Image (cartoon, grey):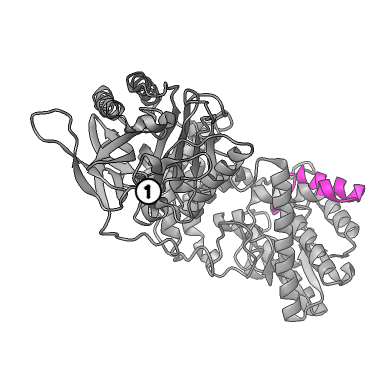
C-alpha cells in the first residue's frame, strides 16, 4: 500500500447451487489465498454464498437462514486476514429479500450494500425474488445469536475509507447497477470513492465479453477510479445459462487485468489510488462533493510495501505496440505541422528558417516544416535549412544536415561561424583555448543570431528545434537555441523524437532520404560545441546530464501526476531493472530535480509551440511554476532513501 499501490483481487469460486456451506468453504479458501498473495481488496461474485441461479429456492427460509449463518462463518474465518472483502448473498430485512454485498474487515461485518437495479427482462427475473435497495443507510439487526444485540449498516450510499491510506475509499455496486444509464458508482465517485467494486453474475452470450470489458474500462475512465469486477463462473446452474467468470480490473480507462473466460480462479490487479487522486486533483471538472446523505465507514489495513505485478513502462511517452506507436507518430506530426501552418498563415511569413545540425531535433523540425509547407501548398524551396559549422562540427553530422535539406527539397545555406565566434571571443576577452561555458554558449548564440538575420532577409520565421526534455532540464543556451519564433518540438520529449524520425524513415518512399534519417538516428545526441576527437563527436549530452530515457520517465510522472520523488524512484527501479543500477537511477533523478527547478526561468519565457501529449512545460499551459521555487522538499526526500 506504500505510495498508493493497492493489490486487488477479483475472485470466482467454483460453487454448488444452494449449498452455502460448501460455497463458504471455497470463499474462505480463496480469500486466504488472495490475502496470502498480498491482496488488500478482495471481491467475490454476486450471491456467491448461495449461487445466483437458485431461482425460487431464494424464497425458501432454510436457504436464507443458511446463507446468513455461512456469512458469519466466513467473517470469523477471515478475521486474521488483512483485507477488505466483499461477498454476495441474499439478505432478509423486514419481510423483504435483498441481493446484497456484505463488507468484511478483520472479522467485522461493516455493512450490507443492496443491489439497486434489478433486471427483469430476457433471461433475468430478479424482481420475482428481490426488492430493490434503498439509498438511505440504516442499521439492521444481524441476528448472529450473540447475547448482545448486534447491528450492521444497510443501504447503497456508503463508502468505506481506509484509516491508513486516505486515498483508498471503496464503494460497491452489483452487476446490473453498472449497465443502467445512471449507475450508483457515479454518485459513489462524486462522493469520494476512488475504487468501485462490483459483485456480478453476468451470463455469457456471443460478444458480451467485449461489451462488458469496454463498459468497465469506460466507467473507470469517466469516474477516474479503479474498478474491480468479480463475475460468477463455473458451478452456477447451466439449465438455461452459462457463466464464464470473466473478471476485470481497470484503472482510469486502462484494463490492468482481465481473466480468461470459463476458468474459475483469482485475478489480481495493482490499483494506484494515489495516481487516481492526483488525476482528480488536476481536473477541476471532476467535482467531489460533500454528500451528507452518504455514510462513511472506516476500516483498517496494514501499511506494507505492495509487491507490484503491474507492468511499469520504461517509456511512458511512447506506446509499446507498433501500430499504436505509428498512429501516435502520425498524429503528432500532424499536430506539429498544423501548429506551424497556422503561425505561418497568421504572420504572413511564406519562408521558414531552421538551423540544421544533422541531429535528431533539427531533423524532426525540418520534417515538420516540410509537411506544413505542403499543407499550405507552398514550394519547399522557401524553407531555408541553415548549416552553421563551428569548432565541434563533425563530418558525419555536416553531411547528414546537407543531404537531408536537399532531399526534402529545401534551400541549403551554409554559414561558417568560426570567425564570428572568434571575433566575439576577442571582444569579450575570452581565451579560445578555454573550453568553458562561455566558449560553448557563444556558439549557440551566434547560430541564433544568424538564423534571425536570415529570417529578416527572407521575410521568414525561425523554426525552433529544441524538444521538451531539453526544456525540462534547461539543456539549452538562454537566448541561443532556447529562442525561436515558433518551437515545433517544444511539446515532444526526446524519447518520442527518436520514434517520430524512425516513423518518417520507415514510411517515406525515398530510399536515400530514409538512409539519411537512419544515420541521424544512429548518431549520438550532442550539441557539438567542443572540438571533435579523431573526427568523432567528443561531447555526448547523455554523458553530461544523464540518459534521456530516465529523464523522460521522471518528467512524465512529475508533470502528469505530481508523484513524490521516492515513488518515482521506486517505479524507475522496477521499470529499468537490469538496465540501470539503483545508484545510477538515484544519481540522475537527483540531477533531474536540481535542473528542473533551477532552469524554470528558461521555460518562463518559452516561445510558442504546440502541446502534443498529456504533459507539457509551457508557462501558458501546463506548467505555471515560479522561476525561483525551492527544490529542498524534493531533494531531501531523495536524500532519505
Mark 1 crowdedness (10 Å alpha carbons): few <14, some 14-19, many ≥20: many
- 27 or 70: which is nearer to us? 70
Residue beneath label 1, please? 116
| Residue 430, image x, y percentages | 64, 62
Q: Please indicate, yes or no, whether residue 595 appears anywhere in the rendered image.
A: no
Q: Position of residue 259 (x, y in %)?
A: 54, 30
* Number of on-image labels: 1
Q: In the image, what residue occupies the spot 24% across and 35% down?
A: 109
Q: Nearer the viewer, residue 372 or 465?
A: 372
Residue 145 image offset from top left, x and y in percent: 14, 28
Residue 639 among those drawn in magenta: no
Name which residue lies at 72% across and 74% down.
Answer: 342
Q: Quadrant of residue 68?
A: top left
Tell me residue 131's x, y (percent). Answer: 34, 45
- Can you see residue 343? yes
- The residue lying at 68 percent from left, 72 percent from top is 485
User: In terms of depth relative to the viewer, which is nearer, 583 or 345?
Assistant: 345
Q: Secondary structure at mark 1?
A: loop
Looking at the image, residue 631 sits to the left or right of residue 482; the answer is left
Quadrant where the image shows the N terminus:
top left
Magenta-tinted stretch? 505-532
Q: Is residue 312 above or below residue 495?
A: above
Amino acid at each position: 500500500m506504500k505510495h498508493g499501490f493497492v493489490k486487488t483481487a477479483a475472485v470466482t469460486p467454483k460453487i454448488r447451487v444452494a449449498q452455502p456451506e460448501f460455497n463458504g468453504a471455497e470463499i474462505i479458501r480463496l480469500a486466504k489465498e488472495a490475502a496470502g498473495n498480498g491482496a488488500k481488496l478482495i471481491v467475490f461474485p454476486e450471491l456467491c454464498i448461495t449461487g445466483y441461479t437458485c431461482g425460487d429456492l431464494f424464497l425458501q427460509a432454510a436457504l436464507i437462514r443458511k446463507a446468513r449463518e455461512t456469512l458469519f462463518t466466513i467473517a470469523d474465518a477471515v478475521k486474521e486476514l488483512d483485507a477488505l472483502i466483499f461477498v454476495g448473498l441474499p439478505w432478509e430485512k423486514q419481510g423483504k429479500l435483498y441481493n446484497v454485498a456484505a463488507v468484511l474487515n478483520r472479522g467485522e461485518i461493516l455493512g450490507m450494500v443492496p443491489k439497486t437495479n434489478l433486471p427483469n427482462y430476457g433471461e433475468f427475473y430478479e424482481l420475482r425474488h428481490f426488492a430493490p435497495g434503498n439509498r438511505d443507510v440504516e442499521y439492521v439487526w444481524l441476528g448472529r445469536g450473540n447475547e448482545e444485540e448486534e447491528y450492521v449498516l444497510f443501504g447503497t450510499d456508503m463508502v468505506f475509507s481506509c484509516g491508513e491510506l486516505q486515498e483508498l475509499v471503496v464503494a460497491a455496486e452489483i452487476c446490473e447497477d453498472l449497465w443502467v444509464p445512471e449507475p450508483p458508482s457515479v454518485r459513489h465517485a462524486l462522493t469520494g470513492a476512488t475504487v468501485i467494486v462490483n459483485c456480478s453474475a453476468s451470463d455469457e452470450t456471443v460478444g458480451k465479453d467485449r461489451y462488458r470489458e469496454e463498459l468497465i474500462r469506460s466507467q473507470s475512465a469517466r469516474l477516474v477510479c479503479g474498478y474491480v469486477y468479480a463475475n460468477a463462473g463455473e458451478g452456477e446452474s447451466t439449465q438455461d445459462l452459462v457463466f464464464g467468470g470473466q473478471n476485470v480490473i481497470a484503472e482510469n480507462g486502462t484494463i490492468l487485468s482481465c481473466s480468461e473466460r470459463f476458468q474459475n480462479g483469482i485475478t489480481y490487479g495493482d490499483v494506484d489510488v494515489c495516481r487516481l487522486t492526483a488525476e482528480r486533483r488536476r481536473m477541476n471538472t471532476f467535482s467531489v462533493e460533500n454528500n451528507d446523505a452518504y455514510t462513511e465507514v472506516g476500516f483498517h489495513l496494514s501499511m506494507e510495501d505492495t509487491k507490484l505485478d503491474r507492468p511499469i513502462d520504461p517509456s511512458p511517452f511512447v506506446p509499446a505496440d507498433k501500430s499504436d506507436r505509428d498512429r501516435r507518430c502520425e498524429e503528432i506530426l500532424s499536430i506539429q505541422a498544423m501548429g506551424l501552418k497556422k503561425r505561418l498563415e497568421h504572420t504572413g511569413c511564406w519562408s521558414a528558417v531552421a538551423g540544421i545540425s544533422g541531429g535528431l531535433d533539427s531533423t524532426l523540425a525540418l520534417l515538420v516544416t516540410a509537411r506544413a509547407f505542403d499543407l499550405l501548398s507552398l514550394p519547399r524551396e522557401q524553407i531555408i535549412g541553415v548549416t552553421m559549422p563551428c569548432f565541434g562540427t563533425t563530418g558525419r553530422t555536416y553531411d547528414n544536415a546537407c543531404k537531408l535539406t536537399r532531399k526534402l527539397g529545401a534551400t541549403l545555406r551554409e554559414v561558417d561561424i568560426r570567425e564570428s565566434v572568434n571575433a566575439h571571443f576577442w571582444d569579450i576577452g575570452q581565451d579560445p583555448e578555454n573550453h568553458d561555458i562561455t566558449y560553448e554558449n557563444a556558439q549557440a548564440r551566434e547560430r541564433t543570431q544568424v538564423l534571425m538575420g536570415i529570417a529578416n532577409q527572407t521575410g521568414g520565421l525561425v523554426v525552433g528545434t529544441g524538444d521538451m526534455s531539453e526544456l525540462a532540464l534547461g539543456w539549452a543556451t538562454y537566448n541561443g537555441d532556447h529562442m525561436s519564433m515558433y518551437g515545433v518540438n517544444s511539446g515532444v520529449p526526446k524519447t518520442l523524437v527518436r520514434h517520430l524520425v524512425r516513423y518518417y524513415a520507415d514510411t517515406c518512399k525515398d530510399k536515400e532520404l530514409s538512409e539519411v534519417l537512419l544515420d541521424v538516428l544512429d548518431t549520438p545526441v550532442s550539441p557539438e560545441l567542443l572540438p571533435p576527437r579523431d573526427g568523432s563527436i567528443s561531447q555526448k549530452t547523455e554523458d553530461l546530464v544523464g540518459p534521456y530515457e530516465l529523464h523522460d520517465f521522471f518528467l512524465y510522472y512529475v508533470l502528469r501526476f505530481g508523484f513524490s520523488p521516492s515513488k518515482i524512484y521506486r517505479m524507475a527501479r522496477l521499470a529499468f531493472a537490469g538496465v540501470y543500477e539503483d545508484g545510477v537511477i538515484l544519481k540522475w533523478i537527483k540531477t533531474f530535480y536540481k535542473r528542473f527547478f533551477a532552469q524554470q526561468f528558461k521555460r518562463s519565457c518559452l516561445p510558442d509551440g504546440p502541446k502534443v501529449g498529456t504533459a507539457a512545460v509551457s508557462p501558458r499551459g501546463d506548467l505555471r511554476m515560479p522561476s525561483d521555487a525551492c527544490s529542498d522538499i524534493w531533494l531531501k526526500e531523495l536524500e532519505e532513501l
